[in-house]
Structure formats: structure tokens, C-alpha cells
Amino acid sequence: MPGKIKKQFLASIGRDNPVFVQVLGICSTLAVTNVLENTVVMCLGLIFATACSSFTVSLLRRQIPGSIRMMVETLIIAAYVIIVDLVIQATLPTISRQLGPYVGLIITNCIVMGRAEAYALNNPPLPSLIDGVAAGVGYSYILMIIAFFRELTGSATIWGHAVPGFSSWWVNWSIMVMAPGAFFALAGLIWIIKTYIVTDETGGK
């Protein structure tokens, strides 16, 4: 079982990554990745919601009627997302205002629902918890790479602070902090990963 869990975890952050393989959950790429700090907060909230909702769905899987399972899953996910939203509002009010409604949109994120539906409903609680964490981590590191690149090239800052020796000569690419910049950054990262990383791992050309 530990070997199976490890394999599942590595697959979720690698060859089965929900962002660059299945291209899921990209609305957050558009919404929050222009500032690294906001992205990190959003990603931590998503990891928590994905892991806890998968664990809870698995725990209740034998009691959930098949005819209403998706409604029950949505209710479970919504409960954890509300917790995340309230914690962010209480501890990080400035970031909460910047994120606005996007924290609540975790409820409709297809990665969260997808892991509950595809994995948690058919597996025990602990593997489901780990699968939820893996899916969240696999999603998050992609978004943080994009956020790092977008903030650096669009604002010449990282975590809101000017980068010494960089901001003095770099001309900010305004498009990188706008909506199109998110898609350009995501497309470029997917191309790099699929061309130079995934292909090598699978023995492709």
C-alpha cells in the first residue's frame, strides 16, 4: 500500500498533473497569478480544500446515495472552502480583498470535484487524503511558477518587493500582469514541460 500511495502521489504531481496534462482549473491561472503572494495563499487554500474534501467523501462514500452524490460532494467541498475563506478574511484581510470572489470559486474547481468523484468515491480515506494533497500540490507548483514569472516580468518585483539589480534595467511587460499574460505563461510552461520533461520521462522522441 505505501508503494501504491507513493506512486499515486508522484503521478499527480508529474505525468498526471491536472494542469499541464488535463488542463484543468486554469481559471485561477487567469485570476490570481499576477502576484506571487496571492497565488501562494490561494494554492494553500486549494490544497486544504482538495485534501479534506477527498478524505470526507471517502469516509462517507458508502452512505452517499449514487443519485445525489455530486450534490453531496459539492456541499462537502463548499464547507471546506468557506472555512478557507473565513480564515483568509480573519488573518489576511488585504489579500482577501485582492482575491475577492476567487476563493469561493474553489468550490467549482474541477480538480477538487474530479478527485472526489474519480478517486475518493472508490478508495479508503487515507489514500484519498494523500491523493487530494498530491492533486493540490501538482496544481499549486505550476501556478506558483507562473506567478513568479508573471510578477517578475510584469512588475519587476517578487512578493511585492523590487528585485535588486533587475528592476533598474528591466522594462516591465505590462501584458504579463493582464489576463492574456496568464495564458501566454501557462502555454509556454506546458510546452516546456511536455517537450523537455514529460517526453524524456516517457521515452518519447
Image (spheres, rainbow, N blue to C red):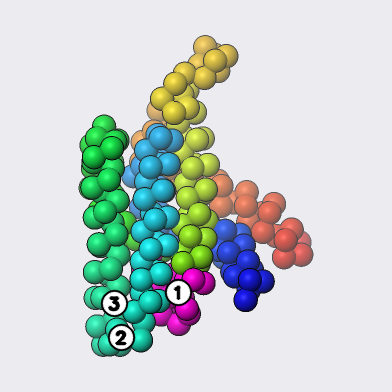
Q: Which type of secondary structure does the marked residue at label 3 adopt?
A: helix
Q: Amino acid at mark 3?
A: Met
Residue at image position (28%, 42%) is 88
Kindly indicate the quadrant of the structure image that contains residue 69: bottom left
Q: Which residues are magenta?
A: 112-128
Q: Which mark is residue 134?
A: none
The residue beneath circle 3 is 70
Q: For residue 121: magenta?
A: yes
Q: Nearer the viewer, mark 3 or mark 2?
A: 2
Q: Residue at x 26, y 49 (%)?
A: 85
Residue at 40% across / 76% down in the picture? 58
Does residue 147 appear to the left or right of 103 in the view shown?
right
Q: Earlier in the sequence, mark 3 or mark 2?
A: 2
- First in sequence, mark 3 or 1: give its number: 3
Label 1 sits on residue: 125
Residue located at (63% from left, 56% from top): 194
Q: Amino acid at mark 1?
A: Pro
Q: Which comes sooner in the sequence, label 1 or label 2? A: 2
Q: What residue would you read off at disc 2?
A: 63
* Residue contact at pointers 1 and 2, CB within 8 angstroms: no
Mark 2 Cα within 10 Å, few/some/many (few <14, many 20+)?
A: few
Q: Residue 2's spot in the image, x, y percent?
A: 63, 71
Amino acid under disc 2: Gln
